[in-house]
Image (tube, rainbow, N blue to C red):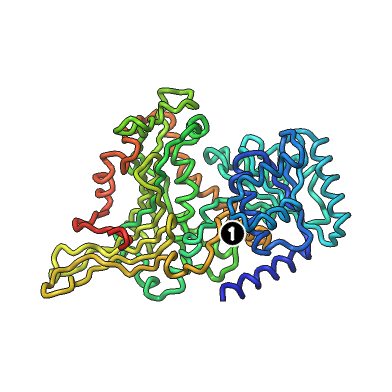
Amino acid sequence: MAAAYSEEIRKQVKSQLDGGITIVVLGASGDLAKKKTFPALFGLYRNGFFPPKTHIVGYARSKMTLNEYHKRVRQYIKVPDAFNAVINEFLALTTYVQGQYDEAESYQKLNAYIENIEKETKIVKKNRLFYMALPPSVFISVAQGLKKNVYSADAINRIVVEKPFGMDLATSRHLGKKLGTEFSENEIYRIDHYLGKEMVKNIMTVRFANVIFGSIWNAQNIENIQITFKEPFGTEGRGGYFDEFGIIRDVIQNHLFQVLSLLAMERPISMDSEAIRDEKVKVLRCIPPIDIKDVLLGQYVRSPDGTKPGYLEDETLKNKESVTPTFATLVAWINNERWEGVPFILKAGKALNESKVEVRIQFKNVAGQLFKNVSRNELVIRVQPNEAVYMKFNNKLPGLSYQTVISELDLSYNRRYSDLHIPDAYEALILDVLRGDHSHFVRDDELDYAWTIFTPILHEIDASKIKPVEYKYGSRGPAQLDEFVSKYGFRRHKEEYVWPVEKL
């Protein structure tokens, strides 16, 4: 079934693109392109999703030969040696053009190069995809250069923009206005790679394809919802970059809030991309700005054994008195009939005890006194690592006693779907761009409402220079965390419980 579905998508892409597309990766010498964009493009090529007349053009300021460029691309494609022939085929599709980001002549040279490719390959229906793997400081100048010099009036043009989409509401609107002047909303794909993750895409299926969840997905049954992002490493030489943004801008305002909107939105009228994004916008409009009383900020210090430096010890961090948070827990409230009074607890941090992204939906206590002190039911959606959906429920301990214990209904993907490959998020999203599907991309008004929710609290944090509480590198976070989340009704299980079972 999976193979048949993949073949259907291959045919759809090739039909829509009429056999050919030119993909321009701007910022081709940068880390994002090397680590994410090119491996994703290779994955699509390896699995046969490119039409026959596909060409990939790398564009950057760095001067290098084609051979040097291919070596850079090759070192980040991590596949067994058996795929060397396929990699060579892929590299044969990729060429390089050196140029500036603020120079008309460079873009004109790029356009002439693309036109020559289209002429030589005899592409009838032109398709041009511009992937901006670039820092936000050059977004506007690059978009203007592309539109004036490389945009083809007789082609279908698409432009992919990486986050961050601004620093606050004003800068986001400025960026949106400038981009909107050059490209139509239908041509713009604002990529948030979390929307391409398998388990984030699965949220709609879990909610709307299972009647058992549809009837309990509301404030009458749910006590709280936690969305957690944990990284086991610190800024590690990226302190200069991270200090501009902080954990809220870097992770929560975009990645975690996209997950929240999928969890909380109403059922769309169809699977059409605009129908889905309409519902996401509707629920965002029901969320008031985050209040400072609903926020806990932290910043990591050196690990207990002294082997891992604290944030302020990062050599790339210029401001050694920085109060930029590397950890944040904040609570959002949704003022509508379905979610009134249910806290959405969003937690994100660096230098923590594990790598994990998950959604934890905790249900209300069991009514009555038949079973005392039983744990709450929880539905957990593990986004990464080891994708899974499992339901924590109470079960009788086998044997002569009537003691209740926590158990689980477990759908672990590495067991149930061991024969299926889960594509990288970027691979899935670039395929959506090729298909012209906006479902998993951020629309302009959606971005606007998200920034409306976060801008006041971000400005308050920036202006007040709120000092975050310290937590040790490798810990669960600030010592105040458990007390903070308990204020919003989250209850940790008293009984010792470990998932998955293999770790017991």
Q: State left or right for residue 123 relative to residue 192.
A: right
Whole-percent x, y for residue 160 in the image: 65, 50
Q: Position of residue 79 (x, y in %)?
A: 59, 54
Crowding at mark 1 (Cα within 10 Å: few <14, some 14-19, many 20+): many
Q: Is residue 428 left or right of residue 465?
A: right
Residue found 31% across the figure and 58% down from its top: 503
| Position of 60 relative to 359 (above/below) | above
Q: Residue shown at 44%/41% (left/top)?
A: 248
Residue 389 or residue 276, whichever sits in front: 389
Q: Quadrant of the C terminus?
A: bottom left
Q: Is residue 317 above or below residue 359?
A: above
Question: In which quadrant of the rendered view does residue 108 lie?
Answer: top right
Query: For the point 35% across and 68% down, which residue is it?
Result: 410
- Considering depth in this image, is 75 or 349 the residue closer to the camera? 75
Residue 379's quadrant in the figure?
bottom left
Can I make out residue 60 in this image?
yes
Quadrant housing the N terminus: bottom right
Q: Which one is in front, 148 or 472? A: 472
Query: In the displayed image of the protein, which residue is found farthest to the front?
Result: 81
Pick the residue in front: 164 or 29: 29
- Where is residue 359? Give x, y as percent: 39, 57
- Above-or-below relation of 419 to 58: below
Q: Position of residue 306 (x, y in %)?
A: 33, 30
Residue at left offset 46%, top offset 56%? 259
Circle count: 1
Q: Quadrant of residue 353?
A: top left
- Badge 1 marks a residue whose secondary structure is helix
Task: Indicate the amino acid at tag 1.
Answer: Ala
Q: Can residue 178 be seen at all in this image of the molecule?
A: no
Residue under pointer 1: 428
